[in-house]
Image: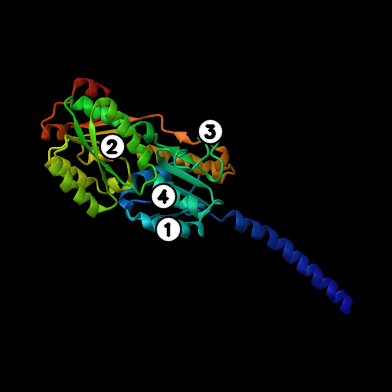
Amino acid sequence: MAVGLTIIMLLTAFGLALLAAPLAAEAQAERPNRVGFLGPAEERVYTDPLLRLRTRLRELGHAEGKNIVFEYRFAENKYERLPGLAGELIRKVDIIVVHASPGTRAVKQATSRIPIVMVGVGDPVGTGFVTSLARPGGNITGVSNIDVVLDGKRLQLLKELLPKLTRVAVLRNPDNPAAKVNFRGTQAAALSLGVDTQLFDVRDRKELESAFAVIAKARADALIVIPDPLFLSQQKQIVNFVVTKRLPSVFARNENVAAGGLVSYGANLADQFHQAATYVDKILKGAKPADLPVWQATTVELVINLKTARALGLTIPSSLLLRADEIIE
């Protein structure tokens, strides 16, 4: 009798195990992929770029709340917070999308295991994020905005706008690992064009206001803003300054010109987030970051704000207007 009862119990347990196995597999299959995002700037800076990222992922078959969920972290221009925020994300997500070199550095230092898709990084090789663009190696791939080859061209644009240009002020955030490389490109162009540069290192709004005071006294002919998330967040303050002081300005991001800056020349940030979604999709489907070549922006936009030009008393050369991808009236 005891033997028969034991057999019945074993058969029952075996049957329950068979039933439980597909249920467990189904539960595991329904677990959504967790995508983290780390932005060095304020949340509002990323409204349009993140919309492009999410829209493209939806087009690729990822339904938010069903098979994909997002975790967002924003450093609010306090780059010292980035390592802590990166540490939070790696405990919660399967893949991380990160903007700009300061954020990418923090995530790279936080994990060598979780896949990372960087966006808006000017020189991924020079900053040590990847071994090469064709074969990144490690756990990082993504999108380069090729700023490293555009910095000198922005100064050339200013010279074309202002043939008598001799002295230019340059804003740089030294906490950005790409900023030193960017400034070298500006310096090289300045040397060939016979233009003096005055560098201002700015890490926060207070230092930005101090730089404004010195630039106003130095009577620079123009201002160049080396790309950094901080300067996207502070674009209104920068634009108010250059318009008030009647200072021609050139930026990397068209968002700065839409806010009232004079000229921008660079890759579209929202387009880069759109491209990053393709990498996220491939990695979630099994691809390894080490095998996905870093995508370099192929379209560089020249945007000119004619309203600002009129306020500054400038006449934009027709050669520049013909080359412009967008003219803001």
In the image, which is nearer the foreground, mark 2 or mark 3? 3
Name the amino acid type tagged 1: Leu
Residue under pointer 3:
134
| C-alpha separation, residue under disc 1 versus residue under disc 2 | 28 Å
Residue under pointer 4:
103
Asked if residue 275 can be seen in this view, the reply is no
Q: Within 10 Å of the Cα at label 4, are there few (<14), some (14-19), or many (20+) other Cα atoms?
A: many
Q: Within 10 Å of the Cα at label 1, are there few (<14), some (14-19), or many (20+) other Cα atoms?
A: many
Residue under pointer 1:
85
Residue 158 coordinates in the image, percent (x, y): 23, 29
Q: Residue at x 34, y 48 (%)?
A: 46
Q: Within 10 Å of the Cα at label 3, are there few (<14), some (14-19), or many (20+) other Cα atoms?
A: some
Name the amino acid type tagged 4: Gly
In the image, which is nearer the foreground, mark 1 or mark 2? 1
N-term mark: 3 or 1:
1
Viewed as shown, does residue 235 lie left or right of 80?
left
